[in-house]
Structure formats: structure tokens, C-alpha cells
Image (cartoon, rainbow, N blue to C red):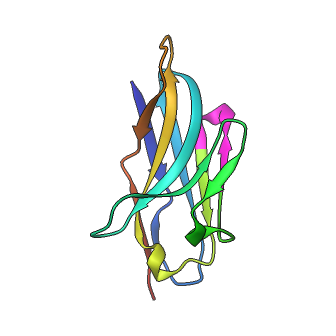
Amino acid sequence: QVQLVESGGGLVQPGGSLRLSCAASGSIGFINDMGWYRQAPGKERVMVATITSGGSTNYADSVKGRFTISRDNAKNTVFLQMNSLRPEDTAVYYCKAKLRQRGGVNLYDYWGQGTQVTVSS
């Protein structure tokens, strides 16, 4: 089985920073894209940032210049450095990995359980 475990969420004041981590573990053969998504109360889950296995990145317009996604392929881990946080960044943040299990053929999406980020004074 495969598990994704996020960490690093919490309460921060506007203008502050947080760093989220997500580690994938289990029977992993290959990880393709990894990414971060968020869901605010009463809203749909939306993409925040994604990164390919080769390191190409993509960001939502609302976080460009403030958030940075990175990954450590050797540790099957993806990070999200969040700077200049705003109240509208408040949400549950989820990581996602598109991966193939060891011995498998197809790629499937796996999600973490989510971590709360609250930006408030």
C-alpha cells in the first residue's frame, strides 16, 4: 500500500511563512507528478502548485511569486514553501502524487489526509 503524510501546517500571522512537507511511503515503483492542492470552507479543492519528476513547476496565479514547490526524489517527498501568507490562503492543504506501485503498470493518483493552514492576526 501507499501512504502520503503531510506536515507543517498551523496558524500564522499575515505576512508570515510556513513550509509544508509531504512524504510518500509504501510499495512505490515510480512517482510522476506531485502537487499541492487546497480547499477552503465552502469551496472546491483547487490546484496550488505541481512539479514533475524532472522538476518542471506550475503555479496557480494567486500564489505565483509567494509559494515555491520542490521535491526530493530520493526521499519521495514534496515541499511547499509559503511566504507572504494572506488570510485568503487559509485552507486545508492536500498533497497528491501520481505514481505507479512496485510491480504495477498504471499510474494512479494518491492523496494525503490534509493539513490545516490558517492565516490570521
In the picture, residue 46 is in which quadrant?
A: bottom left
Q: Nearer the viewer, residue 82 or 37?
A: 37
Side of 100 where 113 appears, left or right? left
Task: State the residue at coordinates (32%, 67%).
Answer: 43
Q: Quick one: quadrant of the N terminus?
A: top left
Q: Is residue 31 above or below residue 71?
A: above
In the picture, residue 84 is in which quadrant?
A: bottom right
Q: Residue furthest front?
A: 61
> Which residues lie in the magenta part?
69-77
Q: Nearer the viewer, residue 117 or 49?
A: 49
Number of numbered callouts drawn: 0
Q: Is residue 92 above or below residue 75?
A: below
Residue 19 x %, y %: 59, 61
Q: Nearer the viewer, residue 57 or 12?
A: 57
Task: State the residue at coordinates (56%, 77%).
Answer: 85
Q: Residue furthest top?
A: 103
Q: Is residue 60 above or below residue 78?
A: below
Q: Residue furthest left?
A: 42
Residue 65 x %, y %: 69, 70
Residue 105 x %, y %: 49, 14
Residue 41 x %, y %: 30, 70
Residue 76 lies within the magenta run: yes
Q: Quick one: quadrant of the C terminus?
A: bottom left
Task: State the residue at coordinates (72%, 37%).
Answer: 54
